[in-house]
Image: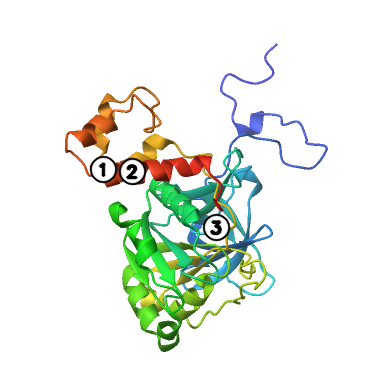
């Protein structure tokens, strides 16, 4: 028996009351088309500081995002109280597609990837020439991560007043990585910051390096009005202390780019890296991979790159550098 007429309107339809008094469950998620766009500046224990226009707001991730998290550098959509006033809390409801993702794992056998920063376009690898001693294998690993993520690498060597840079730079000559060499006097008078700032203009640059190399000291020189705590090198272990505990994005003076200071790293695992993506950073070698066997590691007897170089299409030093970088996945950073 038909309860309602042929064309019932809303008044004709009986709705069963919801005894629990809550809203019915639905798979339809709100689009939040009126959400404001912001940039994640830092993340601290689940709370994110987001820059929206000219103010910062504190926000938390909305439940509807599930396990998807936001990291420093992410562009996000935010709703709620956007005043930035004390004790207010907004909600991140959407993470926009990323242009780049710098990742690392704890070790080469660790399948869990950690996103270091998002949307950066340059990676500044900061290394001291002494106190502590440089670790070339860690530099190699950071280069591999940069090439894998599509970031342009920049080698920044500090403390040249304690040791010369020639030997270390010679091992990276074939890679053509741009570099800057600084010393403590230049940091003191501001000339080092001026030279580095020229390389950062108009870009979002992530700074990485192990503790004690002067990374945060350099960031403080670049952005003097937002000074962060710095540490010292342990005289017994030769390692620096972790003074930077979370990544932080800072605007360069004049809004001419961004610098992201990251905590010092002791390891940089590359479990997630595919060798086929690393070779893309060597355009003179890429055509030679056409004859490689499937899933070639580019360091095996049947690799076509050996013939490509032997025929004079590329410098042998370039192939050596590629294989040295790829081999870092099999070595520990301190080797």
Residue under the point 37% across and 48% down: 150
Q: Position of residue 263 (x, y in %)?
A: 58, 63
Q: Position of residue 35 (x, y in %)?
A: 51, 56
Residue under the point 33% across and 60% down: 170
Going from N to C along the chain, the mark reached first, 3 or 2, is: 3
Going from N to C along the chain, the mark reached first, 3 or 1, is: 3
Disc 3 to disc 2, how far (Cα)?
Answer: 48 Å
Q: Tally the numbered discs.
A: 3
Q: Kindly state the secondary structure of the residue where label 1 is placed.
A: helix
Viewer-nearest of discs 3 and 1: 1
Q: Is residue 67 above or below residue 140?
A: above
Q: Which mark is residue 320?
A: 2
Residue density around tag 2, few if under 14, some if 14–19, many if 20 or more, within 10 Å: some
Task: Give the colouring mode of the picture.
Answer: rainbow
Residue holding disc 3: 78
Viewer-nearest of discs 3 and 2: 2
Q: Kindly state the secondary structure of the residue where label 2 is placed.
A: helix
Residue holding disc 1: 316
Q: Nearer the viewer, residue 255 or 214?
A: 214
Say which quadrant the N terminus sits in: top right
Evaluate if marks 3 and 1 touch, with contact meaning CB atoms under 8 Å apart. no
Residue density around tag 3, few if under 14, some if 14–19, many if 20 or more, within 10 Å: many
Residue 28 appears in the figure: yes
């Amino acid at each position: 028996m038909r309860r309602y007429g042929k064309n019932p309107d809303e008044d004709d339809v009986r709705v069963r009351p919801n005894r629990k008094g809550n809203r019915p469950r639905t798979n339809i998620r709100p689009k939040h088309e009126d959400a404001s766009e912001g940039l994640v500046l830092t993340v601290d224990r689940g709370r994110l500081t987001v820059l929206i226009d000219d103010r910062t707001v504190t926000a938390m991730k909305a439940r509807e995002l599930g396990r998807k998290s936001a990291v420093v550098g992410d562009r996000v959509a935010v709703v709620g109280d956007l005043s930035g006033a004390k004790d207010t809390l907004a909600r991140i409801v959407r993470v926009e597609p990323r242009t780049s993702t710098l990742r690392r794992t704890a070790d080469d056998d660790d399948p869990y990837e950690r996103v270091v920063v998002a949307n950066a376009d340059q990676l500044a690898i900061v290394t001291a020439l002494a106190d502590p001693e440089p670790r070339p294998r860690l530099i190699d690993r950071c280069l591999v991560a940069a090439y894998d993520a599509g970031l342009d690498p920049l080698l920044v060597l500090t403390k040249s007043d304690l040791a010369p840079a020639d030997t270390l730079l010679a091992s990276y000559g074939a890679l053509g990585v741009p570099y800057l060499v600084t010393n403590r006097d230049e940091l003191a008078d501001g000339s080092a910051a001026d030279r580095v700032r020229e390389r950062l203009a108009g870009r979002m640059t992530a700074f990485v390096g192990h503790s004690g190399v002067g990374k945060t000291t350099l960031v403080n020189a670049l952005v003097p009005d937002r000074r962060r705590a710095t540490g010292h090198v342990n005289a017994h272990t030769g390692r620096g202390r972790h003074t930077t505990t979370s990544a932080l994005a800072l605007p360069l003076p004049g809004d001419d780019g961004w610098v992201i200071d990251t905590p010092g790293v002791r390891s940089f695992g590359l479990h997630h890296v595919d060798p086929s993506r690393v070779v893309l950073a060597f355009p003179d070698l890429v055509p030679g991979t056409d004859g490689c066997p499937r899933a070639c590691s580019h360091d095996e007897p049947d690799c076509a790159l050996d013939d490509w170089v032997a025929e004079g299409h590329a410098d042998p030093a370039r192939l050596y550098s590629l294989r040295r970088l790829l081999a870092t996945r099999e070595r520990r950073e301190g080797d």
